[in-house]
Image (tube, rainbow, N blue to C red):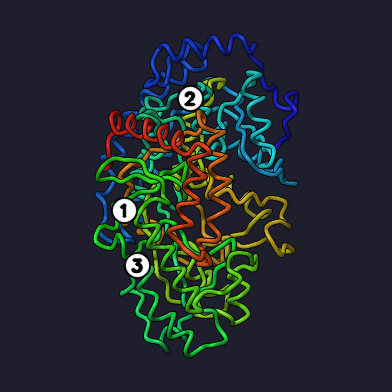
Amino acid sequence: MKNGDKKRFGMKKVIPVLLALFVALSALAGCGSGGAQTTTAAATTAQAATTAAAATTEAAAATTAAATTAGGAAAEATTTAAAAAEDQPVAAELAPLSLVYYIAATEQTDSATVQAAMDAYLTEKLNCTLTIVPIQSSEWNTKMPLIYSAGEQVDLAFDQANRGYYTNAANGVYHPLNDLFAQYGQGAAEQMEINTPGLIDAPKIGGVLYGVPCEKQTAQCEAWYFRKDIADEIGLDVETLVTLQDLEPYLLKIKETHPEMTPYYVSTGSGIHTEWATDAIKDNLTKYEELNGAVNLLLVDLEQDKVLNHYETEWDLDRYQTLKRWQDTGLINPDAATTTTGGGDIFRAGKTWLIGGGGAPTTLSSYQSGYGTDFYRWRATGPIMNTYQNTTALTCIPRTALDPARSMMLINLFHTDKEYVDMFNSGIEGKHHVTNADGKFELPPGASSKNDTGYAYGFETFFGNMFLNTLWYNEKEDRYTELREYNQAARKSKILGFYVDMANITTEYAAVEAVRTQYAPILKAGVSPDVAATLKEMNDKMYANGLQKVIDEAQRQYDEFIATVGKTE
């Protein structure tokens, strides 16, 4: 919508020194509370919301019990969302406010049209306007700290684990949201229970919520996609695959019957994932979990609650010895450690029979249409609902928000109001999309792509409730039903909510990662002359560059997490 010029939307400033004092006093008041507001707007909002909170509880009680079929679950989600959206405070009871939302995005050429429509809608719903301020993703980590330190008005802000969410929360940039979410986010909470069970726990830090996550795919999963005709030819049954080594007999058959193909193609940007199971852990596939914030380097032995270096486990030794055997027997391409040609290009050229990718429900159909062939899919990992997957799209309420209660009402609207979600994500009917006879969106006349319409943010997996979006003409009818079932069936991480904060070990972590990324391609390609010796050399160098300090800090944080939050059941 509008650029960062403060004059264009009357963005207020607060003297930085007073901001720092406010943050300090708020911290002393306790981090579990949404915070008492002293402004007239906040007081009015709180008073108006009292009746709405009770109404939302009644609506939730009246909602149909969880359905046993996917169709019933979808109907329940729609019914609950509609009820929650209607139970917002009456706009006339709320003081008028002009709020500001910072997002990581590129300005759209026709965003002003959508901005005006959304402001009219929000004025009717919550007696407020919401100016969307996009900042280029590449500039986000530079500009946002300056905006926060200057004390500028920010009522809602996008954030992610890898953009600074944990650091911002620790530095007092954000309001703690536990109380605010409980009072004004009931509709969002109900939607999450249906669409994304357990999601709200992922971004909590020591039990305290600082960002509300987007309802989308909550489970992380890596998969292999095998050409169906060839898999049938060699007798592959993906249901029998459990570990990496289970693939070996079929790779040998490919080498014998399809000499034009690389049985197991690896490049510097693709190949083996460190979380894939091997025979070494076949009897206890959930013994280890990788630590979010230090994936590919650290994991935790859940039986001993001990943080370990990935590359010192029997799991890694088994994995890389297997890959060396495959390289030695001609199952992996000889240039695996150096080639940058992706697996997709090799597959299209008919030089391999499998390709890696994510395990989300929609990936199979998109691969089949994109590559023009049928596949069998093996979900080689998970799906597991972990911290990282669910801290990639958060909406936070900064300390400089005019009225945190109203900000939370807006968050709730993003999770419950289909009309508003469609407007935010897909623009205006007749201008940026039209609704066809099947009730799906399609491009308006004269447009060959969404970019032609002037509004193509592609927000659905970053803000609010993805499941409320109207389907587009090229999307499967059961897209959201499949995704909901996928989320509901996923194994939940035993340490959901834990994320290693590298703030105290930034230098050491960077030095260790430099060593790891030097050796990892060699091990992954199977070209190491002696796997055990290479691992020892690699580990010695990582320890010389501070690995023990990294492990100790991660262990300290893990121990605190277990003591305060505990493991997920």
- Name the mark on residue 170: 2
Question: What's the residue type where badge 2 is placed?
Answer: Ala
Label 2, label 3: how many angstroms apart (C-alpha)?
40 Å
Question: Is residue 155 shown left or right of residue 137?
Answer: left
Image quadrant where one finds the N terminus: top right
Q: Residue at (26%, 40%) from the top-left corner? A: 61
Q: Between residue 85 and residue 569, name the one nearer to us.
A: 569
Assess whether mark 1 and mark 2 are in contact (beta carbons under 8 angstroms). Answer: no
Question: What's the residue type where badge 1 is placed?
Answer: Arg
Up/down of 210 relative to 59, above or below = above
Question: Is residue 378 shown left or right of residue 514?
Answer: left
Which class describes the residues within 10 Å of circle 2: few (<14), some (14-19), or many (20+)?
A: few
The local secondary structure at tag 2 comes to helix
- Name the mark on residue 20: none
Up/down of 452 relative to 2, above or below = below
Q: Residue at (71%, 35%) from the top-left corner? A: 2
Image quadrant where one finds the C terminus: top left
The local secondary structure at tag 3 comes to loop
Q: Name the residue under label 1.
A: 491
Q: Name the residue under label 3.
A: 243
